[in-house]
Image (cartoon, helix red, strand yellow):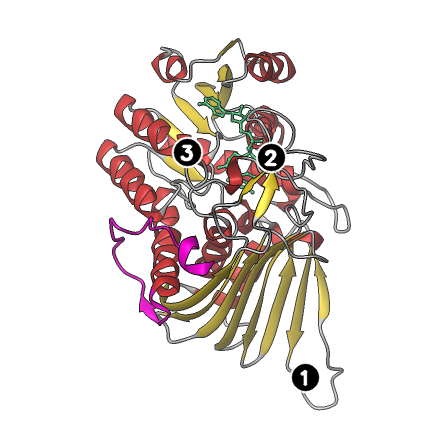
Amino acid sequence: MREIGIGVLGAGWMGDMHAAAYKRLRCHYPELGVEPRLVIVADQSAERARQARDLHGFREWTTAWREVLEHPEVDAVSITTPNFMHREMALAAAAAGKHFWGEKPLGRFPVETAEIAAAVAAAGICTTVGFNYRHAPVVQHARNLIAGGEIGQITHYRGYFLCDYASHPLGALSWRFSRELAGLGVLGDLMSHAVDMAHYLAGPIARVTAQQSTLITERPKMTMSTGSTHFSVVENGDLVPVENEDAASSLVRFESGLRGTLEASRVIVGPHARMGFEVHGTNGALEWDFQRLNELLLYRVPKGTDDAGYSTVMAAPHHPDFARFQPGVGNSMGFSDLKVIESKLFLESIRDGSARPPSAADALASARVIDAMVRSIEQETWVDVGEISPTAPRALLEEER
Ligand SMILES: NC(=O)c1ccc[n+]([C@@H]2O[C@H](COP(=O)([O-])OP(=O)(O)OC[C@H]3O[C@@H](n4cnc5c(N)ncnc54)[C@H](O)[C@@H]3O)[C@@H](O)[C@H]2O)c1
């Protein structure tokens, strides 16, 4: 069995998920022919790095992330730090010829994602990007149903990622709310996922018009490497300004001519993590919500006196990847399983020397659409998705307020 030495950069929520996924990989995909070996984990917090070493069984830990890329036994890395470190780490990984599994958004702004994608292409390394929602077995099944013409010609697409993780007015101002540390707000954090899903199911988006808003303009500050950067609430903290957008929505036109809508919010009340889609065709429709990961709603236009209405398709062993996790329908998979599927794609890419989607190329495709949304918001008009303008990271919020 060929071993791939793994380093993890950033031991927060996603660092933990990546490390756990690597460890579970062999149990779910024993025939892969390559096996990850956890070599070293880095976090700027010594406590977090040491804890990750102890928890996941890395051989070493460090607070100096460059040591990971210089380590002779490291072949590939996970980039799971906050967004402001992604560019530097990804470019250093490419220069060192080390493959990476990077969390989205790859860059703080589309222009950084473009720079990273170019460095990856020049270095010839393999990449995987954390667009995990497309790996859910019923989502893969939905894509196959669409491609097989089961719901006819697609007439409408609606995608969304509606979260309440920052809906509490005293939800902590972590790195996520800073333009310096996160870059864009929900456009990078959540809309990038919604765009990737739209591309996966319905093909490339060609033209957009968009709007954004910041609903909670000040939050209590929290220190890096403490608490949950999504969910912590700070009572009696100093309030500081939120620097990026809380919510965004967009009308989109696909290259095929299909029309649709995309929405994202981190402050909505009601949905917790409603990442999903509704696809309508001439013969039927499909609907999925991450909060019900194992259920796909399917509507078929009734024939004659057939009953009408949506039916629930439960994730089952005949759907892609499901049987690797559960033996029978009704036994549910969860979010961390999607990360195991993603780690399989990463290791397969390294084994075969060619990146499986979603890679940096898919992150760039999503970033191009986000860039068009940013330009549309600035210009208050429809814009074409195109090459990324180097002037994209402009201060949008000033105009908003
Ligand atoms: N794919 C998904 O569904 C998903 C979900 C959540 C987060 N993410 C992405 O994952 C990334 C990390 O998010 P998170 O929620 O894990 O964040 P987090 O804040 O929980 O963890 C980030 C970790 O990075 C460490 N860190 C910060 N600066 C560092 C440095 N210079 N060197 C080493 N370590 C450093 C912090 O101490 C912290 O432990 C973000 O890009 C985010 O957008 C993706």
Q: Is mark 3 within 8 Å of ligand 1?
A: yes
SS at mark 2 in the image: loop
As drawn, is 380 to the left or to the right of 234? left
Residue that appears at 71% across and 73% down: 310
Q: Nearer the viewer, residue 108 or 213?
A: 213
Highlighted magenta segment, given as a residue range? 379-401
Residue 84 tag number? 3
As drawn, is 377 to the left or to the right of 260? left
- Is residue 366 shown above or below 183? below
Q: Nearer the viewer, residue 151 or 54?
A: 54
Q: Residues within 10 Å of mark 3 (few under 14, many from 20)?
A: many
Q: How many marks?
A: 3
**Mark pair 2, 3: CA separation:** 14 Å
**Mark pair 3, 1: CA separation:** 51 Å
- x and y percentages locating residue 167 in the rendered image: 66, 50
Residue that appears at 43% across and 45% down: 358
As drawn, is 174 to the left or to the right of 298? left
Magenta-drawn stretch, dominant element (helix, strand or loop): loop
Say which of marks 1 and 2 sits in front: 2
- Is residue 313 shown above or below 187? below
Name the image quarter holding residue 173.
Answer: top right
Residue that appears at 29% across and 36% down: 120
Q: Is mark 1 within 8 Å of ligand 1?
A: no
- x and y percentages locating residue 159 in the rendered image: 54, 63
- x and y percentages locating residue 91 in the rendered image: 30, 30
Say which of marks 3 and 1 sits in front: 3
Mark 1 or mark 3, which is nearer the start of the sequence?
3
Which residue was labeled with disc 1? 302
